[in-house]
Amino acid sequence: MVPPFVTKLFRNPWPETVPNGTLIRIFADAVEQTYSSLVPKWQESGELDPEKDSFAGVILDPTNPREATTIAERVMIVFGWGPDMADFVPNGMSKADSQERFGIPNGWLIENASYCIADGEFTWGHSAGVDYLIEGIDETTVIFDGGGSGYSAEQDKKVVQEVGELGLLKIKEIRDAWLAARRAEEAGRRWYNNSDTPDPKYAQILTMPVIAAIGPEELRGGPTPDWMKSAGAVVKPTMEPGISAFGSPTMAPGIAPSGHS
């Protein structure tokens, strides 16, 4: 009997190119397809313990957002099935966490570098994702981090790996088609959004205060800090490249004279 499947979406790093409804449907389909292709086969062959009727998997946001400061903020998808699914979610989270931090399977770390596993982390099984430092990557690699729990260590990895690959390859297909269509309309398109403008976190550098600058004032951009103005440190267009804005080896903190490091 096929169990009801659960798929939860926690974050979407592509809302303009892959809407929430599309994203969760992609992964819900990937979960059902993965279960159908793997679990009945394991059950028939006796590879799956008949008492193991629940599973949970976690897939992290593959864009690895800098603003996400905790592992919970990195979670994109949680999926699973069975009456005890909730019991296995923390296990998968812990595996995904170690995979994300080191780019090495959780099981390998447990066996070979347990000093990398802190108290309170899970002590069984492989994570899913790319074994960057062991296997390397190529153009066919699907890059993500995840973890699952409920079956054997290898089965846990296989389930999450397949769900992640099926889902992310579909997302790649959608986003590649989106970009190709936009560039067909507008050859100079540069950014992955409808407005073709940078995310504010990339544009904010243009308005950040600088410590020092050399070059024509109208080209340097950004406000000049008050301490630079009071020190006469505003660089004029006539200054030669490499000459200190302060005109002597007496420099502001953290700035070395020309020719020194």
Image (cartoon, rainbow, N blue to C red):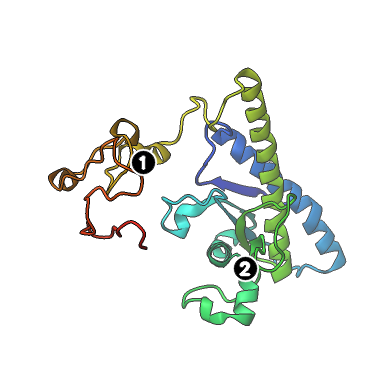
Residue at 22% from the left image edge and 41% from the top image edge:
234
Q: Which mark is residue 2?
A: none
Res. 3 visible in picture: no
Label tally: 2
Instruction: Please tell me which of labels 2 and 1 falls first in the chain.
Output: 2
Position of 96 relative to 185 (above/below)? below
Q: Residue furthest top?
A: 185
Residue at 66% from the left image edge and 69% from the top image edge:
126
Mark 2: few/some/many CA within 10 Å (<14, 14-19, 20+)? many
Mark 1: few/some/many CA within 10 Å (<14, 14-19, 20+)? few
Q: Is disc 1 placed on a helix, strand or loop?
A: helix
Q: Which mark is residue 205?
A: 1
Quadrant for the C terminus in the image: bottom left
**Percent position of residue 214, x then y:** 32, 43
Residue at 58% from the left image edge and 24% from the top image edge:
188
Residue 88, by quadrant, is: bottom right
Q: Amino acid at mark 1?
A: Ile
Res. 115 visible in picture: yes
**Percent position of residue 227, x then y:** 16, 48
Q: Is disc 2 placed on a helix, strand or loop?
A: loop
Position of 84 relative to 140 (above/below)? below
Q: Residue furthest right?
A: 45
Q: Is residue 39 left or right of residue 221?
A: right
Task: Pick the residue in front: 219 or 4.
Answer: 219
Q: CA distance from mark 2 to mark 1?
A: 34 Å
**Percent position of residue 142, x then y:** 69, 51
Residue at 55% from the left image edge and 30% from the top image edge:
190
Q: Is residue 71 left or right of residue 187?
A: left
Q: Amino acid at mark 2?
A: Ile
Position of 195 relative to 73 (above/below)? above
List the residue tagged with mark 2.
Answer: 104
**Percent position of residue 129, x then y:** 65, 59
